[in-house]
Amino acid sequence: ILNVEQSPQSLHVQEGDSTNFTCSFPSSNFYALHWYRWETAKSPEALFVMTLNGDEKKKGRISATLNTKEGYSYLYIKGSQPEDSATYLCAFIKAGNQFYFGTGTSLTVIP
Amino acid sequence: DTEVTQTPKHLVMGMTNKKSLKCEQHMGHRAMYWYKQKAKKPPELMFVYSYEKLSINESVPSRFSPECPNSSLLNLHLHALQPEDSALYLCASSQDLAEAGEKLFFGSGTQLSVL
């Protein structure tokens, strides 16, 4: 069993607050780390694919960093909006196209 | 068209029934995946097809039988399921294998209940 841990499990923030969550994964056999956003009643949607240690990716108000040596990735949301409310999943990909998802962080942005 | 379409959206079946879940994409993706997700758990990989050939089977019981008739279609045939198989079944596709840095495109899933 390969553990991919996300914290916190859930988060409530006020509109306009900035927030961040963590994804922890094994530091060996690393191929890629993905972040997905999953809104209720919709399909999970890819946010970022990160492959290199030190990678930083940005999409609007959302950004992510990657540290493969210590096995963690951070997702940051600046100025949270109600439409950011969703579950954020990370997935660790190792050799052989094996995906391991974390349990997700459920974000609720309160207007 | 950037959609992965899954049918049906909901399915209720008895333990003696045979049913199939369907997944379709027209993005020219060469890898397709089946995932199973139980409530409050992460999605678990079941099967991966690459270029229409089964490349990964994550020790899934034989009551689940995948089929990839062509590069756009992926089926999951269900037979003699157990109540504990009740879950959300997600299909996904990627341009190539995800270890090449490709992201997954997901369908909205089939919510399966086994009575």
Image (cartoon, coloured by chain):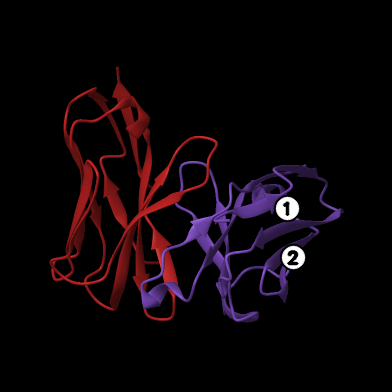
Chain colours: A red, B purple
Read off the residue under disc 2: B63
Chain letter of mark 2 equals B
Pointer 1 or 2: first along the chain: 2
Query: In the picture shown, does residue A27 fall above or below B84?
Result: below
B5 or B61, nearer to the observer: B5
Tell whether B30 sits left or right of A88: right
Rendered location of residue A109, percent (x, y): 30, 25
**Mark drawn on residue B82:** 1
Which of the 4 quarters of the picture holds residue B93? bottom right
Rendered location of residue B59, percent (x, y): 58, 73
Residue B47 appears in the rendering: no
Tell whether A32 sits left or right of B3: left
Rendered location of residue B71, percent (x, y): 66, 74
Mark 1 residue type? Gln
Q: Spatial distance from mark 1 to mark 2, Cα to Cα?
A: 9 Å
B79 or B66, nearer to the observer: B66
Residue drawn 48% across the image and 76% down it: B96
Check if mark 1's residue and mark 2's residue have beta carbons within 8 Å: yes
Residue drawn 57% across the image and 75% down it: B30
Residue drawn 74% across the image and 65% down it: B63
Query: Please, which residue is most extreme toward the front here?
Result: B1
